[in-house]
Image (cartoon, rainbow, N blue to C red):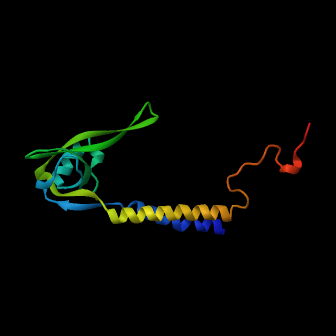
Amino acid sequence: MSLRSRVWHRPAALLLLLTNACYTYQVVPLAQLRPEMDVRLQLNAGGVDRIRQGEFRSAVNNFRTEGRLVSVGGDTVQLGIARTVYEANVRPVTTFTPLAVLRSEIQAAEVRLRDQKRTTITTVALVVALATASVLAIKFGNGRSGGTAPPGGGGTDNILVP
């Protein structure tokens, strides 16, 4: 394995690790839920069975479902489930479809929060990785640093005057 191919492994692994570190989930009581919050709900077995029998079969994974709260009522919580639909089989369009979940089916609710410290670390790591990649490309580019050859393929000594 050459030096150039090994140089990319560590920054790529670091970037992959840190891009998942910007958000955390915090458990909150159901009374504190408000519309427009991004949440992850832990459901009981009855709720999972009811949801999987409807059109949202794939919305539940390991007794959890997540989305954005549309409305919060006394006995139900409406969750907007993101779905990607391909318009004319080419362009993806994300739509939010409401899913009603009974409060009695919710065992726990977690709110998604942005972690400022991790976001800062991720940004700094990304900038350092890009700067390192630029320096390595210039230093080990072997003359292939993105420039274009002049017309005719040569320098000033190959210029032909008609």
- Taking the image as shown, residue 142 lies to the left or right of residue 114, namely right
Question: Which residue is outermost to the right?
Answer: 162
- Taking the image as shown, residue 57 lies to the left or right of residue 11, namely left
The quarter holding residue 17 reads: bottom left
Query: In terms of depth relative to the viewer, which is nearer, 127 or 93?
Result: 127
**12 lies above or below 47:** below
Q: What residue sits 44% from the left and 30% below the top? A: 88
Q: What residue sits 7% from the left and 46% below the top? A: 74
| Location of residue 24 in the rendering, given as x and y in whole percent from the top left corner | 29, 61
Q: Is residue 81 visible?
A: yes
Question: Which residue is outermost to the left?
Answer: 74
Q: Where is the C terminus found, in terms of image quarters? A: top right
Q: Where is the N terminus found, in terms of image quarters? A: bottom right
How many numbered discs, if any?
A: 0
Query: In terms of depth relative to the viewer, which is nearer, 83 or 159?
Result: 159
The quarter holding residue 106 reads: bottom left
Q: What residue sits 69% from the left and 61% below the top? A: 141
| Location of residue 110 in the rendering, given as x and y in whole percent from the top left corner | 22, 58
| Location of residue 113 in the rendering, given as x and y in whole percent from the top left corner | 27, 58
Query: In terms of depth relative to the viewer, which is nearer, 147 or 81?
Result: 147
**158 lies above or below 14:** above
Question: Which residue is outermost to the top?
Answer: 88
| Location of residue 11 in the rendering, given as x and y in whole percent from the top left corner | 52, 65
The quarter holding residue 159 reads: top right
Q: Is residue 54 visible?
A: no
